[in-house]
Image (cartoon, grey):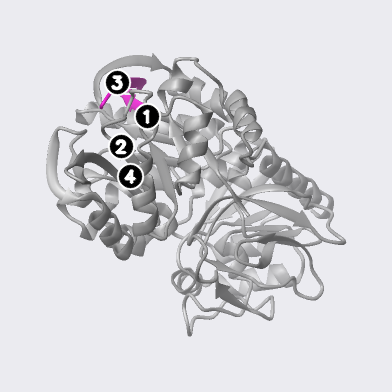
Amino acid sequence: MLLPRVIPCLDVKDGRVVKGIRFQGLRDAGDPVELAGAYAEQGADELVVLDVSATPEGRGHALEVVSAVRAVLPLPLTVGGGVRELADAEALLAAGADKVAVNTAAVARPGLLDDLARRFGRQCTILALDAARSGDGWEVVVRSGRDRTGRDALAWAAEAVDRGAGEILLTSWDRDGTGAGYDLELLAAMRRAVPVPIIASGGASGPADMADALAAGADAVLAATIFHDGHTTVAVLKAELAALGVEVRR
Amino acid sequence: MTEVVLVRTGTANLASVAAALGRAGCAVRLTESGDDLASAERLVLPGVGAFGAVAERLDALGLREPLAERLRAGRPTLAVCLGLQLLAEASDESPGAHGLGVIKATVTALPEGVRRPQLGWNRVAAGPGCRLLTDGVAYFANSYKLDAVPDGWSGAVTDHGGPFVAALERGAVLACQFHPELSGPWGQALVERWLAAAGEVA
């Protein structure tokens, strides 16, 4: 039986970990290598690093960060942010990523997913999908939430999986950084829409939210703020999940 | 410093494997040369990608024979993920493509109705005769699998829609369907036991 994954997420800008609310108002949250080492020690199941740098210089730092994190991390490492073409993904994999997440560029050119899957395999090709509530559904938002695309999030995910995405990193834009809990309706709807693993992201406040997300169909739960701000540790959180009846790797 | 030769199979997560070997105190050298494959005291065959594409690449680089030869001779070799599947004769992933044929079996797809790819942590149970493998929880990233432990090998099994091979060992040859380099302290310890076993043979 596959065990659910608890995944700390490092949003990295210009070589430092940052965190905001709904992708805005970023503040410093620490050194990526120190945090990666600490989370690994605490029993994290995977690490996600998202490069949110806005400049080419910042992106250069991201490769250094990936490589420095890789050296200390005996866990799967998923990296996203600014991946526009195969060469970007190749550079991240060479630096130490195991999986590459694409977001805005895949919306602009869905064929990127086919290219990535053909070259690196589906298990390496992750669709990062930021979804905002809209009417009775959810629409895809891109460019760190600045642009609404009008595209239905569930339809886009299904297309992405057909093209080659092997996993969906699903972030609720409405909940990101708020601690209001994951968007469980979004997770349940996505579970019905795609057969691949889903990483729930956006809104985690603690173990109860995570257990709910897993029950709603997520295979993994991602959180940033609660770990960076020292509200909890991965070890404490996993013990709490176990107490709630969720079988976790410890 | 202990040197480990890592085969550049193309699209593998070489950096992750190299990092795990580095943490174990080894110097890592990448190669695409058949001579290196024949002479390396310790060899790692990583593997990410499609069965047919990597098998083709082994042929293009002239690596098929030296690799099959060292596996048959039991020289210290660690094969990871697709690396394990390449030991078989064929795979349903790439009909018509030829594996190394060290194991008389065909690799099959994970069944319908389970999450595919299997991306995540799963329990591993070591079978009789295992010296390197132990019970634990390992990180997998696969859509295809080897169904049974072949004669002459010891193995560990896991279950995702039915039991299949998590890893095989025979002397200083270790082949893992999971990624030991990504399987936390348990995986790191396994890599180090393989290095120690390789040291005894070398």
Q: Are marks 2 and 1 in contact (CB under 8 Å)?
A: yes
* Residue that badge 4 annotates: A186
- What range is drawn magenta here? A11-22
Q: Nearer the viewer, mark 1 or mark 3?
A: 1
Mark 1 → mark 4, Cα distance in angstroms: 12 Å
Mark 2 → mark 1, Cα distance in angstroms: 8 Å
Is residue A226 at all visible to an observer of this figure? yes
The local secondary structure at tag 3 comes to: strand
Is residue A7 at all visible to an observer of this figure? no
User: Which label is found at residue A203?
Assistant: 1
Q: Are marks 4 and 3 in contact (CB under 8 Å)?
A: no
The local secondary structure at tag 4 comes to: helix
Q: Nearer the viewer, mark 4 or mark 2?
A: 4
* Residue that badge 2 annotates: A172
Q: Is residue A50 above or below residue A83?
A: above
Residue in view at x 84 percent, y 54 percent: B131
Q: Amino acid at mark 4?
A: Leu
User: Which label is found at residue A20?
Assistant: 3
Q: Are marks 1 and 4 in contact (CB under 8 Å)?
A: no
Q: Are marks 4 and 2 in contact (CB under 8 Å)?
A: yes
Q: Amino acid at mark 1?
A: Gly
Q: Are marks 4 and 3 on the same chain?
A: yes
Q: With A105 as the anchor, is B139 left or right in this view?
A: right
Mark 2 Cα shell of 10 Å, populated few (<14), some (14-19), many (≥20) = many
**The numbered mark 1 sits on a residue in which chain?**
A
